[in-house]
Amino acid sequence: MDFIRNFPLFTIVFSLFSGVLCMMLPGKAAKYYTAAYECLLIFFSASVLWYTSVTGTSFTYVMGEFPAPWGNEIRGGVLEALIALTFLIVMLCSAFAGWHFLVQDIDESKINLYFTLLNLLTAALMAMTWTNDIFTGYVFLEILTLTSCGLLIVREIGRTTLAAVRYMILNLLGSGLFLLGVVLLYDITGHLLMMNMQGAIAEISKDSRQMTTLTLSVGILTIGLAIKSGLFPFHFWMPDTYGWATPTSASVLSALVSKAYIFLLIKIYWRVIGIDVLDRMPIGKILCVLGMCGIIFGSVSAMRADNINRMTAFSSAAQIGYIYMGIGIGGMAGYTAAVFHILTHAVTKSLLFLSTPRLAEVSDGSLLFKKLQGSALRDRQAGAFFLVGSFSMIGIPIFAGFSSKLLFSLAAVDSGSNKKLILVMLVLAVSSLLNAMYFIRTIIRIYTHPQSAAAQALSSVTAGSAAAQGLAAGTAGSAAEVTSREKQRRASGLRRPDYIIPSLVLIAANLFLGLFSWAVVDLIERGFGMFF
Amino acid sequence: MISNLLTNYEEAAAIVLFGIGFTMLLFHRNLIKKLVGMNIMDTGTFLFLASMGYIEGRKAPIAADGAAKLEEYINPVPAGLVLTGIVVSVSVTAVMLSLTIRLYKRYHTLNLDDIYLLSKHQTEDR
């Protein structure tokens, strides 16, 4: 049974190895290979989750048997396993559900390279989740940045290259600041392993003069990760980045990459700084306020968007705001809500980003709202998937979004501060209202028949002109409609299992998080309990 | 305050370099200059690390003629971190330069604002 302790390392090493292997395989083979090995990784993470929750303890895997102050370590606990498991499931689902568009967007001879990038990105995600060494965190954070940029530019239109450059520039600013923060912390503590750093910081923080230096370094590190994950003033790159990428990339970037940065931040807060020391700094309050601004501004921008992908991307900015608000509320309840929302958003936003391109496909390839009129009637599956995703984002009961909003309010009640309680409740109410407004508006639009508007115009025209002419136009129109429907049916028949199964898995995960939230919350709380 | 800065002049210089690079990366419109800024920023961090690891009057931790006392050596860990950092910085620069070439081939300018305007015109209809 102790063999399971090796599994976290396996997930990282296998992903790196698979990245290299996919370079040599043909495109289709790379796809099926990726599916097979991701299933293996899911098994690994699930085993670790089972092992740590049954034994009730976390474990540290010492790389190369070098003991604590020198070696590099990997740590397995309930929380890491849970996050890794969710990330892998979402990754697998996105890779499959987006395959149809991948073939359109990428030259056939280069598809295996896309899977290479995807596998290296998985390696970075896994390493950032499992690592117990802050500098390893930095290195894989850079690998994550590079691979996510690669995922963006595979679709060779001018907008994606520009979006990738802007995304990279902001990410480089973020990683520069993160590196400086790590270096300053190393300067203060003399360690790079998280547990040793925490011991040193607990000593240092007793001296109030040192608190300024400590706050400064933690602040720099936090700003770096906040830029990278897209917290409020730094969220403006999101619509261009997510809006123009190929669907798999958009889903992976919004659902996983930004979350990995936030999870690393949470891990640093708990394992390096220590939550008691962090409470003495003003960082939590600032994050809370910025998160709230992110929620409101993200939702308002989403309302004003004229393109369904831009709307979904701005809604991502709002969701990142929720997570930071949870971190800002603080305490076990606040962090639990934040982690729960990481899971919720991962399964929901990927579903949304995978259904919007299909809606666009049946609307002349346009993502503009005015052309999407009635698109859910033309592609019923994609419409239904979008519906489920939106309901979860709005926070309708039985879906995951409802549970996370409930958890945020409970955390605010638990925080014991009236000011926080009122503010959080207010922001939650306003943002739910805004979410409902723009998502329900979109749902109504995609489910309203475009003919009802067009028919009226047609009848007024025919009244004025010759009846025979109108009749001829009508028959020609309906004939064209029939052939286009036929074409769509054939096209959707080709990709049916590829698309439906992953989407159903995501919906099932969403419902699981919504209906069994108590079990997940229990797991998260146990995970945080092991963080000391 | 001033005397502190003077004793730690290497660290102070490193932070100044970091600031220069950071503002260049953030505000400059020219893509190549942005990249230069990024490299200055990273170099600032490396200088900070290197100066931190060096201890006046000690030698490199190479045990050539038998192990000496721990107190005779400088701290080698920051040097290792600098090496890792340099590798990361080089690869990031390479990726960014290739992206810049791609953008230049398409839009024939290096100014990010101009590129943004041009790209907006091209894909207005979606």
Image (tube, rainbow, N blue to C red):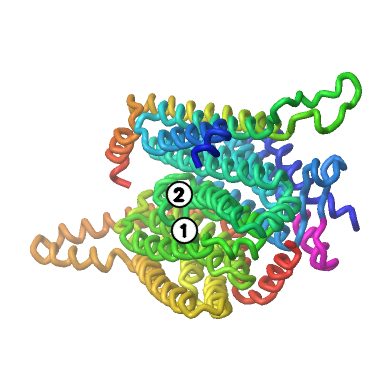
Instruction: Residue A275: say if magenta.
Output: no
Instruction: Mark 2 vs mark 1: give the one in front.
Output: 1
Q: Which residue is mark 2?
A: A242
Quarter of the figure with residue A305: bottom left
Q: Which residues are magenta?
A: A43-59
Contact between labelled residues 1 and 2, with CB atoms less than 8 Å apart: yes
- Residue A198: x and y, percent? 71, 55
Residue at x 75%, y 53% (from the top left corner)? A195
Say whether disc 2 or disc 1 marks the residue closer to the N-terminus: 2
Of residues A429 and B13, the one nearer the viewer is B13
Of residues A474 and A330, the one nearer the viewer is A330
SS at badge 2 = helix
Q: Please indicate whether residue A198 sits to the left or right of residue A246 in the image.
A: right
Q: Please indicate whether residue A203 sits to the left or right of residue A433 in the image.
A: right
Q: Considering only vertical position in the picture, is A269 above or below A521?
A: above
- Residue A441: x and y, percent? 35, 69
Instruction: Residue A52: say if magenta.
Output: yes
Main SS category, magenta section:
helix
Quote the CA–CA distance across marks 2 and 1. 10 Å
Residue at x 57%, y 71% (from the top left corner)? A400
Query: To which chain does the residue with label 1 belong?
Result: A
Of residues A521 and A201, the one nearer the viewer is A201
Q: Considering only vertical position in the picture, is A495 above or below A430?
A: above
Q: Could one spot residue A432 in this view of the protein? A: yes
- Residue A34: x and y, percent? 68, 44
Q: Residue furthest top?
A: B65
Tell me the number on the disc at residue A316: 1
Q: Residue furthest front?
A: B3
